[in-house]
Amino acid sequence: MKAAVYEEIRKIGIKEVEMPRIEHPEDVIIEVHRTSICGSDLYIYRGDLHETMSPGKSGVGHEMVGTVVELGPRVTRYKVGDRITAAYSVSCGSCHSCRLGVTAHCETTNKAVYGFGGAFGGLAGSQAEFLRIPFAEAHTELVPESITDDQAIFISCNLPAAIRGIQNAQIRLGDYVGVVGLGTTGQLALRLAAQSGAARLFAIDKVESRLKKASETGADTYSANQPDIKEQIMEQTGGRGLDVVIEVAGQPDAFDLALSLLRPGGVYSGLGVYVGSEHPINIGDIFLRDLTIHTHGFDNTQPNMWNAIRVIERGMIDPAQLITHRFSLSEIANAYEIFDKAADDVIKVAIHPK
Ligand SMILES: [Zn+2]
Ligand SMILES: [Zn+2]
């Protein structure tokens, strides 16, 4: 079968690899119908995780929907032919962390993530024709018929993350809510915030096409390239600042900007993925302004997968509207290149393995 592999920094290739097989009684094998590229895949692509990847071997991709083609003997929840989606992080469902709902920190799998190389469990990636799903009953959901493959890929990662970002944001009726970083998860968080009681939305990004997409929600848009962005937002909020900022950029300058925009007592809800770097925080400023800080980039997806299904089924949100580009698996190098450059007004890239 064909699978996308990490070849070297900024090079994803397609290789003929062995078919996955059942290795443990709790495994299932799925034929991948649809997969996608996530903002966090760019950390791999750009080489930030180079030391965890085996060039020419490590598979990539962690978002997927597919059909069960083979089951381990202990799997009773599914049958061959069922359409399922899995959380990006593999959790066992029975360890201390899993029972607390902190599933990304599963003690059995030790932070295993599909397609993130040796440091994250050395698992295959979803950007492939078939995928083995370990502990299959613990971090997957059956996809209802009413949900399309295009919608289902968002249940692995982006939509549960956006839901958690909204939960942590503690939006109150009438709040001024900012979203910094308008990639896929930022766009989803903005759309959910619009339905969570925000009086006014402030959408902030450096990329013009993302701001245009964000404006569909009625949000005021601000280019993060403007040096006086803080002054502009202060002027629009009576000099007080925002009640809540959801930050989905995963860049130190975005973190600083988000905190600087908050009113005293405001809430920072972070969904951005930060990898490895140190960054100074002014603890005195956070204390004196009584800020609440939540970070949730390494998201515990599994507890919110069912919620994600519910908000799609009930029509609150159609995440598939964010898909701007489609590629076959063989075109994946091109897909990564466009996504990496934020070129051609890209928001979400869907990959069709068949
Ligand atoms: Zn993802
Ligand atoms: Zn566990």
Image: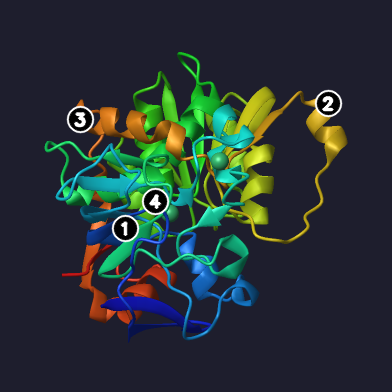
Residue holding disc 1 = 348
Give above or below for 41 relative to 59. Answer: above
Q: Nearer the viewer, mark 1 or mark 3?
A: 3
Question: Mark 1 or mark 2, which has the lower sequence index?
Answer: 2
Image-quadrant location for residue 168:
top right
The N terminus is located in which quarter?
bottom left
Q: Nearer the viewer, mark 1 or mark 4?
A: 4
Residue holding disc 3 = 313
Image-quadrant location for residue 261:
top right
- Taking depth in this image into account, of 244 and 102 the one nearest to the observer is 102
How crowded is the residue under tag 2: few (<14 C-alpha within 10 Å), some, or many (20+)? few
Q: Nearer the viewer, mark 4 or mark 3?
A: 4
Residue holding disc 4 = 25
Q: Nearer the viewer, mark 2 or mark 3?
A: 3
Q: Residue 301 in the image: x percent, y percent?
A: 46, 40
How crowded is the residue under tag 3: few (<14 C-alpha within 10 Å), some, or many (20+)? some
* Residue drawn 27% across the image and 66% down it: 130
Q: Nearer the viewer, mark 4 or mark 2?
A: 4
Q: Amino acid at mark 4?
A: Pro
User: What is the spatial separation of the Cα atoms under label 1 and label 3, in whole angstroms?
Assistant: 20 Å
Q: How many marks?
A: 4
